[in-house]
Image (cartoon, helix red, strand yellow):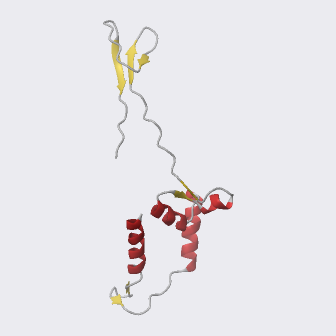
C-alpha cells in the first residue's frame, strides 16, 4: 500500500514539470490549464460506465478495496472488500449412451461406454 502511495505521489509531482510548445520544443513557461469540460466529461464517463468517480478509482487502487462515492451517498460503506472468486467448475466426463450423452464427475470405466468429451477443471492463475 505504501508503494502505491509513492507511485501516485511521484506521478503527480512529475506530471506538470515540462510541456511541449507549438513547435514541438520543450517550453519552460507556465503550462496552460486544460479545458474544465475535459475533466467533467471524463468524470461523467467514469460514473456512467463504472459507477465510480475517478477519485474512487485512485483510492481503490491505493487501498486495494472497492470504493464508491455514489454507494456511500446511498448509505452503504465507502470502501468494501472485493467479493471472493467463484469456485472453479468441476471436471466432467461425458459418455455416449443410447439416448443422449451421460456425464459424470469421475471416469466411468465400463467396457461398453465410449468417452465423447472431457472438460478438465480450470487451474487458478496467479
Name the residue rendered at 36%, 40% in the picture: 124
Residue 50, quarter of the rendered image: bottom right
Q: Classify 84 as above or below 36.
A: above
Left or right of 74 on screen, residue 83: left
Q: Where is the N terminus found, in terms of image quarters?
A: bottom left
Front residue of this view, candidates 17 and 9: 9
Check the image and name the residue furthest to the bottom: 29
**Residue 49 in picture, x, y percent from top left:** 56, 58
Figure disc tally: 0
Check the image and name the residue furthest to the front: 2
Front residue of this view, candidates 117 and 7: 7
Front residue of this view, candidates 67 and 117: 67
**Residue 114 in picture, x, y percent from top left:** 33, 13
Check the image and name the residue furthest to the left: 111
Left or right of 91 on screen, residue 43: right
Residue 106, quarter of the rendered image: top left
Name the residue rendered at 41%, 10% in the picture: 97
Name the residue rendered at 58%, 60% in the picture: 68
Residue 21, quarter of the rendered image: bottom left
Name the residue rendered at 67%, 61% in the picture: 73
Q: Classify 45 as above or below 82.
A: below
**Residue 37 in picture, x, y percent from top left:** 58, 76
Amino acid at each position: 500500500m505504501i508503494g502505491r502511495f509513492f507511485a501516485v505521489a511521484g506521478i503527480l509531482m512529475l506530471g506538470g514539470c515540462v510541456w511541449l510548445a507549438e513547435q514541438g520544443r520543450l517550453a519552460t513557461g507556465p503550462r496552460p490549464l486544460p479545458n474544465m469540460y475535459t475533466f467533467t466529461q471524463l468524470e461523467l464517463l467514469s460514473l456512467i460506465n463504472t459507477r465510480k468517480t475517478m477519485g474512487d478509482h485512485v483510492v481503490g487502487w491505493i487501498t486495494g478495496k472497492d470504493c464508491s462515492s455514489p454507494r456511500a451517498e446511498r448509505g452503504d460503506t465507502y470502501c468494501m472488500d472485493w467479493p471472493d472468486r467463484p469456485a472453479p467448475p468441476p471436471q466432467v466426463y461425458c459418455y455416449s449412451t443410447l439416448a443422449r450423452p451421460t456425464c459424470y464427475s469421475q471416469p466411468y470405466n465400463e467396457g461398453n461406454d465410449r468417452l465423447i468429451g472431457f472438460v478438465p477443471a480450470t487451474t487458478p492463475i496467479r
